[in-house]
């Protein structure tokens, strides 16, 4: 039975189901209890085709979540970058794109390296045993995105908590009630409003100041638009990279030969460049994005009606046999590596791709420089989510 909803992901990444779908039914109709079903796109080329045709495959019509949203929720999600279609998306993305440009990431790289080294050194002070997620993977991306957006260091843990509650609404460890995700959103909006008010009076060199004083087609952003930008950057900017880092750590534990090769090649830039891409392919942080057909169409001869959902499974695309003949093998030197972890191209290609790559390479490298030995001290726990590919608990013992 094919089941790609949240309970499956809480147990495992369903690679066997995806392999079967790619072979037998690459445009598979998937029922959803108490909601409209969807077509699951599992082939690399189909996901690229849909990603690069936003006029046909809209995000605004139904959001990026599998399940349908209330009209109010849909309206709010349509104010996030990830929830907009072009040309609106293009105009709003321009407001913040400079902060994530290759030139800016190069400027930030020393800061990222310093923070990664400090976090790696903290492991020894903690007795070499840590929950990798909370004490390492969560820290670096949280510190970086808060600094870039303009959140004071003292408030980082508040952003961490709000982020968990907002994206973990399907996981009982993160949400206390069905309304808790909405409550977390209300709290972070109020926080953003107060911070934005201070930037109106005293602008700084940060993204929030750029949003407060920026214009789209001659008009300043509304308070709610700023709130939605703030949430998207703070949540997506730390949550996704956190899970990429945790996935990389688990891979290093499960692949001791690869770990030894990376330890032996700590100063081999070419190796670390290809290794970082393979970490990304192997452990994407987002399972999928939903799109909605704007008119009657078809994919691989399967008719799809206007208003029906297509869910683009990046996790499946990253092991598509037509692109990765040995996709179930972790290969540090894989090249080319046309993974879709940052999306299938088109307007929604991940804004923070360069930032994520730099953080993965820096933290993983600094840890292996100090602690070539790594092992689990307990069972990892996966997030119950049909959207986020998350590890929420990863107990690790490091050794020299």
Image (cartoon, rainbow, N blue to C red):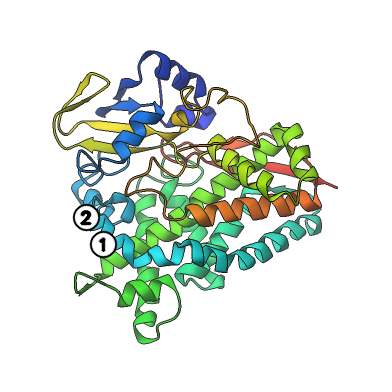
Q: Are marks 2 and 1 in contact (CB under 8 Å)?
A: yes
The image shows residue 14, relative to residue 260, as above or below, that is above
Front residue of 298 and 148: 298
Query: Is 7 on the left-hand or right-hand side of 70?
Result: right
Numbered disc 1: secondary structure: helix
Label 2 and label 1: CA atoms lie apart by 7 Å
The residue that mark 2 highlights is: 87
Tell me the crowding category of disc 1: few under 14, some 14 to 19, or many 20 or more residues within 10 angstroms, Cα based: few
Q: Residue furthest right?
A: 400
- The image position of residue 95, as x and y in percent, is 33, 67
> Can I make out residue 187 in this image?
no
Q: What's the residue at 42%, 60% (across, down)?
A: 233
The image shows residue 95, relative to residue 59, as above or below, that is below
Front residue of 349 and 375: 349
Q: What's the residue at 52%, 57% (across, down)?
A: 355
Query: Is 235 on the left-hand or right-hand side of 272?
Result: left
- The image position of residue 165, as x and y in percent, is 45, 51
Q: What's the residue at 40%, 46% (across, down)?
A: 177
Numbered disc 2: secondary structure: loop
The image shows residue 58, relative to residue 120, as above or below, that is above
The image shows residue 392, relative to residue 198, as above or below, that is above
> Can I make out residue 141 in this image?
yes
The mark found on residue 340 in the picture is: none
The mark found on residue 91 in the picture is: 1
């Amino acid at each position: 039975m094919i089941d790609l909803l949240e309970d499956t992901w809480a147990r495992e990444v369903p690679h066997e189901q995806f392999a079967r779908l790619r072979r037998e039914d690459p445009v598979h109709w998937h029922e959803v209890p108490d909601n409209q079903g969807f077509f699951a796109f599992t082939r690399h080329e189909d996901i690229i085709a849909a990603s690069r045709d936003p006029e046909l495959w809209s995000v605004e019509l139904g959001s990026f979540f599998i399940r349908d949203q209330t009209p109010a929720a849909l309206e709010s999600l349509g104010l996030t970058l990830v929830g907009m279609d072009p040309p609106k998306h293009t105009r709003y993305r321009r407001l913040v794109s400079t902060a994530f440009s290759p030139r800016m990431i190069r400027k930030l790289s020393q800061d990222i390296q310093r923070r990664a080294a400090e976090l790696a050194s903290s492991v020894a002070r903690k007795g070499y045993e840590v929950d990798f997620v909370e004490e390492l993977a969560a820290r670096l991306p949280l510190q970086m995105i808060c600094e870039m957006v303009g959140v004071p260091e003292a408030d980082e843990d508040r952003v961490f908590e709000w982020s968990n509650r907002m994206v973990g609404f399907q996981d009982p460890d993160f949400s206390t009630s069905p309304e808790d995700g909405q409550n977390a959103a209300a709290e972070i909006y109020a926080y953003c409003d107060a911070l934005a008010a201070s930037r109106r009076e005293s602008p700084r060199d940060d993204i929030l100041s750029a949003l407060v004083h920026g214009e789209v087609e001659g008009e300043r952003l509304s308070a709610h638009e700023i709130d939605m930008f703030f949430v998207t950057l703070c949540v997506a900017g730390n949550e996704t990279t956190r899970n990429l880092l945790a996935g990389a750590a688990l891979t290093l534990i499960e692949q001791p030969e690869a770990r030894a090769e990376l330890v032996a090649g700590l100063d081999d830039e070419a190796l670390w460049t290809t290794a970082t891409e393979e970490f990304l392919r192997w452990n994407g942080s987002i399972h999928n994005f939903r799109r909605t057909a704007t008119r009657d169409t078809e994919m691989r001869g399967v008719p799809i009606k206007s208003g029906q959902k297509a869910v683009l499974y990046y996790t499946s695309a990253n092991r598509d046999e037509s692109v990765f003949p040995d996709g179930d093998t972790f290969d540090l030197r894989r090249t080319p590596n046309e993974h879709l972890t940052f999306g299938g191209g088109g307007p929604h290609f991940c804004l923070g791709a360069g930032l994520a790559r730099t953080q993965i390479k820096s933290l993983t490298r600094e840890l292996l420089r100090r602690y070539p030995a790594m092992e689990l001290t307990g069972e990892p726990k996966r997030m119950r989510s049909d959207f986020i590919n998350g590890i929420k608990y990863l107990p690790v013992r490091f050794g020299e």
